[in-house]
Each structure stands twice: as C-alpha cells, then as structure tokens.
Image (tube, grey):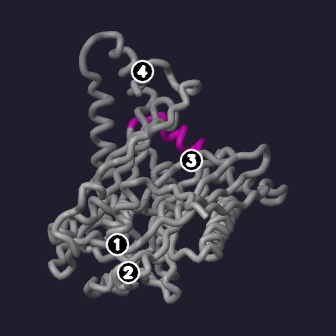
Amino acid sequence: MAILTGLSGHEIYCLEKKGFLPGDLVIGNSVMSMGFIGGLASGLKTLVGGEVEQVTSIIHEGRQRAYQRMEREAHERGDHGITGVSSELVQHGGNVEFLAVGSSVRRAPEAPETQTGAARPDGFFSTAADGQELYCQLDAGFAPIRFVFGNVAYSIGIGGGIMGMLRGLGRGEVHEYSEIFNHTRHHALERITKEAQTAGGNAVVGIRTLIMPFQGMQEMIMIGTASRHRGLPPPWNDGVITSDMTNEEMWNIIRAGYVPIRLVLGVSVYSLGIAGGVTSLLKSFVRGEIPELTSLIYEARENALARVEKDAAAAGADDVVGIKTYVYQLAPGMLEFMAVGTAVKRMDLVRTASEQLPTQAVVRDKQTFHNLAERPMGIEL
C-alpha cells in the first residue's frame, strides 16, 4: 500500500542520509472530562494560587494516553520510530481531546542500528524533532529514546491576586507573582528531566516551551526528546543535560567545542505602581521619554537575567547562549519579563560526525496552504 507520511522532501532526504525510510502518519487520541470532583477541587485551589495539581494530573494523563496509542499504532505497522511528535489539546464542549501526531520511519534494510542511533533495547524511538532536526541530533551524537514532556497547570489565584494588587500600589517587583511564575516554570523543567532519566536518557534536547490557557487557568508545557550520548564525560554522563536550542543550533555549538548542559530561565514580575502610572500617563500627552517606564523595564530585564546567571553558575557553565527575552502584560501597569537560554560547557571530546550540515538540513519548508477567510486580505502568495 502507498505510504501516507507527513514528512517533507527535505526531511526524507535527511533521514535517508541516516538510514531511515518514511513510514505513515500515526495518530493517538484520548477524550477526557475534568469531572465534577476534579473541577470542584481545582476551583478551590485557585483561591490560593500556584499549581493546580488535579488539573496537572488530568492533562498529563490525557497527553500520555494519546502518546501511547500513537506509539502502539507505529509498532503495529512494523515501524522503527516516530519523528515530529506533537501533543495538542482540542476543546469539544465540556470535554478535552488530547491528540498526539507524528510521522513514523523505518530503518533501511542495509542500515545498521549503530548508524541510526538506536538507544532503546527494542530499537524503537520517538522524538519531538522533525526529520531535519533529527539528522542534526544524530550527527551530534545524541541517540533519541522517546518523546518526553513536563507540564504544570497553575493559577495566580484570588489570594495571590489580592496580594499582588496591594503590592501593585507601589513601583517595583511584585514578589508574589514572581515566585509563582518562577516556581511553575522550573517545575515543568524538573518534570521533563525526570521523564528523561526514567527513560534511560542523559539529555533532553530541542526543548520547546508553550504557555496556553486551560479552563480559566494556564498550562506551561515543555516538550523535547530524551536522548543518550555515550561520549559525555562525568558528571554529565549520569545526570541529565537540558537544552532549548534547536538541534541545528546545538550541532553548531558542539562543532565549536561546547556542549549544552542546562536550560536556564529567570522570571520577574514588575508593577509600575499607581503613582508611576499616573506620572507616565500625564507625560504620554507630550513628546519625549518616560523615565519611569524606561527605568522599570530596564530593572525588570536585569532582574530576570540575574536569575538566569544564577542558574548557570549553579550548573557550572562557561557561558549562556541563545538567550531570548519575552515580555507579557499580566494587567494594566503589570508586566512579566522572562529570559530563557542554554548554559554550555567546553568539552573538546564531544564532536559532530560530519564536517558540515547539508543544505537540506537547514532550509525551511514553505507553507502552501492559507485560509484567507480567517486572515486579513492582501496576503502575498
């Protein structure tokens, strides 16, 4: 029968270079209800803020069930791995569908397992990386084991909101919010690290982070690929390194003599305060700089970066690369600043297999479907 794959031409080219042939698109799903008891308990939890453990557990269970069904489908087809695994949520009235989708691959008959990087006893693997990213990952020496994720459902809470509102009367950091946001983001990282360790990995690579609304709360989820690198020296060979660099970026960093050791992040929530808000509002009627906003935003970014530096120092890093900063408005006059990067360490013993990446491993596919009914007119195709 014909193969129905989600892999692009660039991905197929790259995977063939590593001994894989395209398989079929595989899907797993699970439709779940929050339930009266879970909904009631989580509603009470939101009064004080922080993680809503009942909701975290339900979401985690739903995502795992969908993933397991997708993997079982690939096994039944006789495939050897799944690439580009995604984990999605779809609302259906009062219920939620958890959906896992990926493209399976098969080991070419002439390709030895050592070339394709099998790390599990059964030779099967799953990865969040697409075909191009997987080429970079394998060439950098990281054998994929399985798709992993860490999630936290959380709420600032009515209690936290009141304290934050009172603190917001003055200019500066709102520590109640900063603590909640720092804790939840680090908690997600701890969980994805634990999943990788349980799977037998010593690395989680290509981590992507997403924050989304869920049932009046927010879920933060980190997804990545638990992997095994046999060339890591102590203590990183027995621990778990984490990286939010793309696999293409990671390949280049390793080629330069460095290895990612830890995803590092820092969060700071700041309030302009009533007095500062009024002052900046009045000054906005005239042309020129608003010093109150300038200094506050600068201070908030510096605070978030200081937390990143602290994380990196604790990991024993030489540098932090790929730092990205994000700013979100939580409420009028209240902003969240988040800085994320990857701490790296010089390790000359870890090298890439190839001298350079093929063009097909870095060129991006173009979108060929556009729904103009849901987008502004005037799009150039």
Q: Is residue 201 one of those drawn in magenta?
A: no
Q: Residues within 10 Å of mark 4 (few under 14, many from 20)?
A: few
How many other residues sit within 10 Å of disc 1, few (<14), some (14-19) or many (≥20)? many
Residue labelled with disc 1? 18
Q: Is residue 276 left or right of residue 357?
A: right
Q: Are marks 1 and 2 in contact (CB under 8 Å)?
A: yes
Mark 2 secondary-structure assignment: loop
In the displayed orientation, state which residue is furthest to the right.
36
Q: Mark 3 or mark 2, which is nearer to you? A: 2
Please give the label number shown on residue 212.
Answer: 3
Mark 2 or mark 4: whose residue is earlier in sequence? 2
Front-most of residues 322 and 63: 63
Q: Which mark is residue 111?
A: 2
Front in this rendered view, residue 291 or 356: 356
- Looking at the rendering, the stretch of residues picked out in magenta corresponds to 159-171
* Amino acid on which the number 1 mark rests in the picture: Lys
Spot occupied by residue 25 in the image (x, y as percentages of width and height): 57, 60
Label 1 vs label 4: CA separation?
Answer: 61 Å
Q: Earlier in the sequence, mark 3 or mark 4?
A: 3
Nearer to us in this view, 161 or 84:
84
- Is 137 displayed left or right of 21 in the figure? left
Where does label 4 land, which residue? 278
